[in-house]
């Protein structure tokens, strides 16, 4: 979730870094709206990474706090924000960046199905012989997606580079550059393997003993969530823990973002395992579990992730939901969309609250049907969502 903040002065330099000697990326006018990505810690002068639209394109750079209006609001909302992630689009985000793929061979079609059901390593096994026989750029793009989902970023980049050389594609180029940026800033080099989760971590940010405790917590979260939802992953789920600074550099999210699932669980940590980290682990594990079971709407993803990580709708949130419904401003569940990453803070908070309230209503009113049964019968979700809309006052 990003906040629109304004530039204070005319001729303000948007720089490539926080140092005064950093190069100028653009020159901004007073009152120009900028979007804060995150605050950069460790700098002598408070500094923020921001994005600004100029001449129809988005330019990113750094501004000192002294040149930004509205930081009080930003800091207040950052302190008040609950868990906010980008998993609504989540696992489908990278998939949508890959060119339309129509595999011709039976192994390639099976590989696409395996990737969709969170079995990318198995997909790679099937694709390797196909790559030796074919120079189809879409096949290399598919192999790159499988490698990326299997946490083999360097191999994914190699496959995508080959695909782009065979046939340029703007969406694949965007995915390639994103993963290139991630690998450049990722220092999570140590690995631990558990029963259901493979953990990669930055040894400079997480002590080895803490990493072992985190792996156990992730395994426990998966076992509990899978028992509730009925998902059984044939391959281990990849989880990556990093320092908050490294996390923001690799995934480029707002400062209060607490984690995300984009095919792998990714969580920023401050070197310790506490209750808040455990809740985020569970939250993102729900997204991973749902990804194994198919494609589900954002409200269902986020409502269920909040519910199973221990959240409950507050009285204030219920009152706001009811008030927005009376005003005709509360969207139907099906209209909440898939990608919430560009919502402003107020609308994001309402979307999360509405989703949690809807899932709580499901548990209250469809207890006999059950959540695991719903996940085995996805065609039942649409009529149930319509009933939940009615119960929400829509």
Image (cartoon, grey):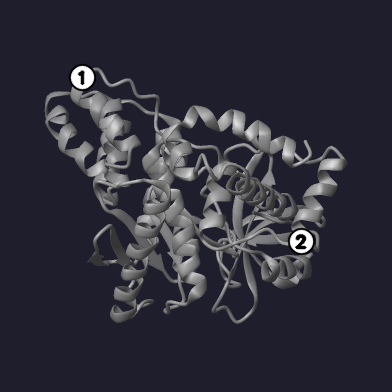
Kindly state the secondary structure of the residue where label 1 is placed: loop
Q: Which mark is residue 333?
A: none
Q: Is residue 1 above or below residue 334?
A: below
Q: Residue 8 is drawn in which quadrant?
A: bottom right
Left or right side of 273 for 161: left
Q: Which mark is residue 315?
A: 2
- Residue drawn at 40 percent across, 24 percent down: 100
Q: Is residue 14 visible?
A: yes
Instruction: Please state, as top left, top right, bottom left or bottom right, where the C terminus lies in the image.
Output: top right
Kindly state the secondary structure of the residue where label 2 is placed: helix
- Residue drawn at 37 percent across, 28 percent down: 168
- Residue drawn at 43 percent across, 77 percent down: 273
Instruction: Please state, as top left, top right, bottom left or bottom right, where the N terminus lies in the image.
Output: bottom right
Q: Is residue 172 above or below residue 70?
A: above
Left or right side of 162 for 51: right
Between 305 and 133, the one lying in front of the other is 305
Where residue 39 sits: x, y (%)? 61, 69
Left or right side of 293 for 324: right
Q: What residue did someone put label 1 on?
A: 105
Between 277 and 139, the one lying in front of the other is 277
- Residue drawn at 35 percent across, 35 percent down: 116
Kindly report the distance in space between the C-alpha atoms of the residues bearing marks 1 and 2: 55 Å
Q: Is residue 243 above or below residue 233?
A: below
Q: Nearer the viewer, mark 1 or mark 2?
A: 2
Where residue 87 sits: x, y (%)? 51, 49
Q: Residue 253 is drawn in which quadrant?
A: bottom right
Q: Is residue 322 above or below residue 66?
A: above
Between 223 and 269, the one lying in front of the other is 223
Where residue 109 sits: x, y (%)? 26, 24
Toward the front, the furthest residue is: 368
């Amino acid at each position: 979730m990003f906040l629109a903040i304004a530039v204070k002065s005319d001729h303000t330099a948007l720089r490539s870094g926080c140092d005064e000697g950093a190069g100028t990326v653009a020159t901004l006018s007073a009152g120009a709206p900028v979007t804060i990505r995150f605050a950069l810690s460790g700098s002598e002068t408070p500094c923020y990474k921001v994005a600004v639209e100029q001449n129809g394109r988005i330019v990113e750079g750094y501004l000192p706090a002294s040149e930004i209006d509205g930081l009080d609001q930003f800091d207040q909302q950052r302190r008040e924000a609950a868990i906010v992630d980008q998993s609504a689009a989540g696992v489908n985000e990278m998939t949508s960046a890959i060119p339309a793929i129509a595999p011709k061979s039976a192994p390639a079609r099976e590989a696409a199905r395996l990737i969709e059901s969170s079995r990318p390593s198995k997909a790679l096994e099937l694709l390797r012989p196909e790559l030796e026989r074919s120079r189809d750029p879409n096949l290399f793009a598919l192999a790159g997606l499988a490698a990326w989902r299997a946490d083999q970023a360097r191999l994914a980049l190699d496959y995508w580079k080959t695909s782009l050389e065979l046939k340029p594609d703007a969406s694949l180029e965007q995915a390639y550059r994103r993963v290139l940026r991630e690998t450049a800033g990722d220092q999570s080099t140590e690995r631990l393997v558990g029963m259901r989760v493979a953990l990669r971590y930055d040894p400079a940010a997480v002590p080895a003993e803490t990493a072992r405790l985190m792996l156990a917590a992730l395994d426990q979260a998966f076992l509990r969530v899978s028992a509730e939802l009925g998902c059984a992953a044939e391959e281990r789920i990849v989880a990556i823990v990093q320092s908050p600074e490294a996390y923001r550099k690799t995934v480029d999210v707002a400062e209060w973002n607490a984690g995300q699932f984009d095919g792998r669980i990714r969580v920023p940590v401050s070197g310790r395992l506490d209750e808040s980290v455990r809740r985020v682990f569970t939250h993102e594990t729900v997204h991973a579990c749902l990804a194994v079971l198919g494609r589900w709407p954002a409200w269902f993803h986020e409502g269920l992730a909040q519910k199973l990580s221990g959240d409950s709708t507050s009285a204030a949130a219920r009152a706001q939901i009811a008030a927005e419904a009376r005003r005709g401003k509360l969207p139907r569940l099906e209209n909440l969309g898939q990608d919430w990453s560009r919502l402003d803070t107020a609308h994001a908070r309402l979307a999360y609250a509405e989703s949690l309230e809807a899932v709580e209503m499901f548990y209250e009113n469809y207890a006999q049907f059950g959540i695991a049964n719903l996940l085995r019968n996805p065609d039942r979700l649409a009529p149930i969502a319509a009933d939940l809309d009615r119960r929400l006052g829509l």
